[in-house]
Amino acid sequence: MMSQKRENIKIGSQVKVVQKADQRTGKLTEGMVAKILTNSPTHPHGIKVMLENGVVGRVKEIL
């Protein structure tokens, strides 16, 4: 999946993330990437990012 590779996510990209509190429901939050928090090149649950509004979550979709 594209959201599992760090190279596919750029600062300023429009993405949908799932926050830690929303993992059970799968509720997605849309926003613009401000910071990439995952250092490894891939992650099985999605790359962790911080959105411009301060929300931290794992990328599920790249728009």
Image (cartoon, helix red, strand yellow):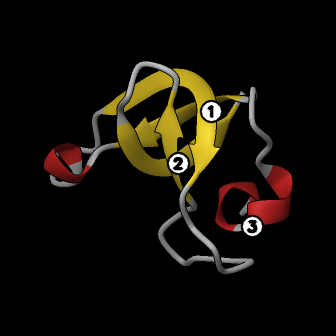
The answer to whether marks 2 and 1 mark residues whose Cβ atoms lie closer than 8 Å is yes
Q: Which numbered marker is on residue 5?
A: 3
Query: In this image, 56 relative to 51: left or right?
Result: left
Q: Amino acid under label 2?
A: Val
Q: Position of residue 54 (x, y in %)?
A: 38, 28
53 and 14: which one is in front? 53
Q: Earlier in the sequence, mark 2 or mark 1?
A: 1
Circle 1 residues within 10 Å: few <14, some 14–19, many ≥20:
many
Q: Quadrant of the C terminus?
A: top right
Q: Residue at x 41, y 19 (%)?
A: 53
Q: Amino acid under label 3?
A: Lys
Q: Which numbered marker is on residue 13?
A: none
Residue occupied by mark 2: 49
Q: Position of residue 43 (x, y in %)?
A: 58, 76
Secondary structure of residue under mark 3: loop
Secondary structure of residue under mark 1: strand
Task: Give the spatial CA distance, label 2 vs label 1.
Answer: 7 Å
Q: Would you place residue 15 above or below residue 26 in this image? A: above
Residue occupied by mark 1: 33
Q: Would you place residue 10 above or below residue 20 in this image? A: above
Q: Position of residue 26 (x, y in %)?
A: 28, 44
